């Protein structure tokens, strides 16, 4: 997938902070016209969202896509359930994985590829507080190392 054709609308930064992401999947979404128009304007919040599997179908819940400002009576509800378009084998894999204790399905990124809205979802295992501290320390150490290399190369 070429990065230049990818237009990111929203990311869930807290997901990678709160979970170890084991596997990622790309899912399409069944959206209404006003939802797509609102997404094209760059409006969405997926931080509170989650994915549930019900009767062999995956659903995206609690994701905020605001009403389209130019919409009429055909506007959508901002926090409605949205169907995810995945293969049956992928849904079975997700369902099987979530039966383990501490594993959940979280939305990671909402973006457009070749004009189609896609959602990157991940299988996440919850981090403990000490894991979060360790991740922050590693990120800070990497940042300091990059700064040191940059200053050394300049001087």
Image: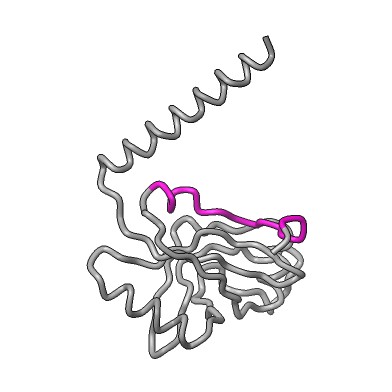
Q: Is residue 63 left or right of residue 115?
A: left
Provide residue 111's location: percent of width, then percent of height: 65, 62
Question: Which residue corresponds to the image point at 37% horizontal and 31% vertical from the top-left?
Answer: 137
Quadrant of the frame with the C terminus: top right
Q: Nearer the viewer, residue 31 or 113?
A: 113
Q: Is residue 78 left or right of residue 38?
A: left
Q: Nearer the viewer, residue 111 or 89?
A: 89
Quadrant housing residue 147: top right
Q: Nearer the viewer, residue 33 or 140?
A: 140
Quadrant housing residue 1: bottom right
Q: Residue furthest left?
A: 101
First to last magenta residue range: 3-17
Q: Residue furthest top?
A: 155
Question: Which residue corresponds to the image point at 47% horizontal and 55% vertical from the top-left?
Answer: 47
Provide residue 143's location: percent of width, then percent of height: 51, 28
Q: Is residue 105 left or right of residue 131?
A: right
Coloring basis for residues: one colour
Q: Nearer the viewer, residue 36 or 117?
A: 117
Against 64, is 97 above or below? below
Residue 33 part of the magenta-drawn span: no
Provide residue 153's location: percent of width, then percent of height: 66, 17
Quadrant housing residue 74: bottom right
Question: Which residue corresponds to the image point at 43% horizontal and 53% vertical from the top-left?
Answer: 15
Residue 11 part of the magenta-drawn span: yes
Question: Which residue corresponds to the image point at 44% horizontal and 65% vertical from the top-left?
Answer: 23
Provide residue 10's location: percent of width, then percent of height: 60, 55
């Amino acid at each position: 997938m070429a990065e230049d054709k990818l237009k990111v609308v929203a990311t869930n930064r807290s997901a990678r902070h709160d979970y170890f992401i084991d596997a990622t999947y790309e899912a399409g979404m069944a959206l209404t016209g006003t939802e797509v128009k609102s997404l094209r304007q760059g409006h969405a919040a997926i931080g509170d969202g989650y994915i549930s599997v019900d009767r062999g179908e995956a659903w995206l819940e609690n994701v905020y896509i605001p009403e389209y400002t130019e919409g009429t009576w055909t506007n959508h509800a901002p926090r409605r359930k949205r169907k995810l378009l995945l293969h049956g084998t992928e849904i079975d894999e997700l369902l099987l994985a979530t039966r383990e204790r501490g594993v959940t399905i979280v939305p990671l990124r909402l973006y457009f590829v070749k004009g189609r809205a896609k959602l990157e979802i991940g299988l996440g295992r919850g981090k403990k507080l000490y894991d979060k501290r360790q991740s922050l320390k590693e990120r800070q150490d990497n940042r300091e190392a990059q700064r040191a290399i940059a200053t050394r190369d300049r001087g």
